[in-house]
């Protein structure tokens, strides 16, 4: 394969890039990882457009495309955190992977981090994505911690039904309208001292985004009870390994990696 680095150029994304960025995400993360993301919804192109149009000052997201001539062959999306720059997504077109284009994007990401005065670059990567894990380790990223993410089948969990929170109909309705428009939405409900934040994705999936005053089991049971016979999958991020008796469709370990940006990175 010829060296893909020739004539490659990184530039800020513009609103018109949204469909191709979505395609790069879908190509890069299907089939195993896409179902964990909101980009499984075709309507998420609307979200991408909004994100790019809002600009980094408002959204905290920096999106860059990699061009070879007129063709977009890669992109990354990074988010500003307090002292770190977090790599949210990076993807190179399948036909030109392994030709050095990912390296150009990663170098650009780190230089942008430095220009934003961030001390560290951070990212999450699925542990089963061996090629990406090895690539980051070779680029001097270090594993800092791990977490889990699982796809729980939405079935009725009788054991916890008496502690379940119910989502009010108007709240649910508003969430569904927003989900239909841009592929996902976030709904919040409070009951006494308990609260639950749930993501709706693509008309068939939920994501547990937060809970308080409830155990993880009770939060999962609440969502399952609310959406049984309506949705199939609940995505649950978790600090610990999933309990053995949960009805899981799949589970993935995630490495949280970090790299301290040295003077050499600052001078690159
Ligand atoms: C991870 C990814 C962005 C790397 O981009 P890339 O353009 O392939 O990376 P580079 O060509 O700069 O570097 C590739 C290196 O990894 C290896 N590699 C990665 N993907 C490869 C591929 N498809 N074919 C051959 N080698 C590959 C090579 O050994 C190469 O090492 P070398 O520099 O010692 O030769 C790209 O593979 C991709 O888009 N993957 C799908 C999405 C993804 O997994 N993103 C990361 C999730 S956090």
Image: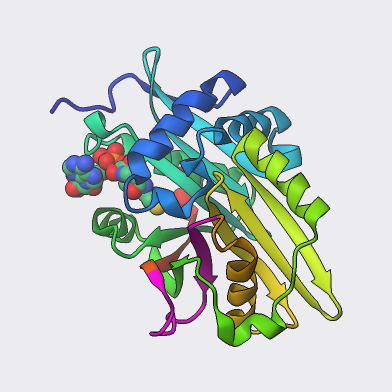
Segment tinted magenta in the rendering: 231-248
Residue 3 in the figure: left or right of residue 199: left
Residue furthest to the right: 192
Q: Quadrant of residue 177?
A: top right
Residue furthest to the top: 70
Q: Position of residue 59 (x, y in %)?
A: 71, 42
State which quarter of the image contains the N terminus.
top left
Front in this rendered view, residue 207 or 105 = 207
Magenta span: chief secondary structure: loop
Residue 250 in the figure: left or right of residue 99: right
Front in this rendered view, residue 153 or 37 = 153
Residue furthest to the left: 1
Q: Is residue 87 visible?
A: yes
Q: Residue at x 57, y 87 (%)?
A: 159
Q: Is residue 103 visible?
A: no
Q: Residue at x 54, y 44 (%)?
A: 202
Residue 197, compared with residue 220, is above or below; it is above
Query: How is the protein colored in the picture?
Result: rainbow
Q: Residue at x 74, y 73 (%)?
A: 165
Q: Residue at x 56, y 33 (%)?
A: 43
Q: How many marks?
A: 0
**Magenta run includes residue 112:** no
Residue furthest to the front: 229
Q: Position of residue 176 (x, y in %)?
A: 69, 45
Q: Position of residue 30 (x, y in %)?
A: 34, 44
Residue 213, compared with residue 112, is above or below; it is below
State which quarter of the image contains the C terminus.
top left
Task: Classify the position of ligand 1 by quadrant: top left, top right, bottom left or bottom right.
Answer: top left
Q: Quadrant of residue 195?
A: bottom right
**Magenta run includes residue 239:** yes
Residue 233, compared with residue 3, is above or below; it is below
Front in this rendered view, residue 77 or 205 = 205
């Amino acid at each position: 394969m010829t060296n893909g680095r020739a004539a490659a150029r990184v530039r800020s994304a513009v609103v018109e890039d949204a469909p191709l960025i979505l395609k790069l995400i879908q190509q890069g993360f299907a089939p195993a990882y896409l179902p964990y993301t909101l980009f499984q919804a075709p309507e998420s192109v609307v979200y991408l457009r909004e994100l790019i149009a809002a600009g980094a000052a408002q959204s905290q997201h920096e999106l860059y495309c990699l061009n070879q001539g007129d063709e977009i062959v890669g992109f990354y999306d990074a988010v500003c955190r307090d002292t770190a720059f977090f790599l949210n997504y990076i993807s190179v077109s399948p036909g030109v992977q392994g030709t050095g284009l990912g390296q150009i994007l990663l170098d650009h990401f780190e230089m942008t981090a430095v220009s934003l005065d961030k001390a560290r670059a951070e990212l999450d990567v699925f542990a089963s994505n061996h090629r990406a894990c090895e690539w980051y380790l070779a680029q001097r990223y270090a594993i800092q911690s791990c977490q889990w993410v699982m796809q729980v089948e939405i079935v009725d969990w009788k054991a916890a039904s008496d502690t379940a929170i119910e989502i009010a109909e108007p709240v649910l309705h508003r969430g569904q309208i927003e989900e239909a428009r841009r592929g996902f939405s976030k709904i919040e409900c409070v009951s006494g001292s308990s609260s639950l934040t749930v993501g709706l994705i693509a008309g068939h999936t939920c994501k547990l985004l937060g809970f308080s005053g409830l155990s993880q089991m009770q939060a999962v049971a609440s969502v399952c009870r609310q959406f049984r016979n309506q949705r199939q999958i609940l995505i649950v991020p978790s600090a610990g390994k999933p309990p053995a008796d949960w009805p899981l469709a799949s589970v993935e370990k995630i490495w949280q990696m970090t790299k301290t940006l040295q003077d050499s990175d600052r001078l690159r």
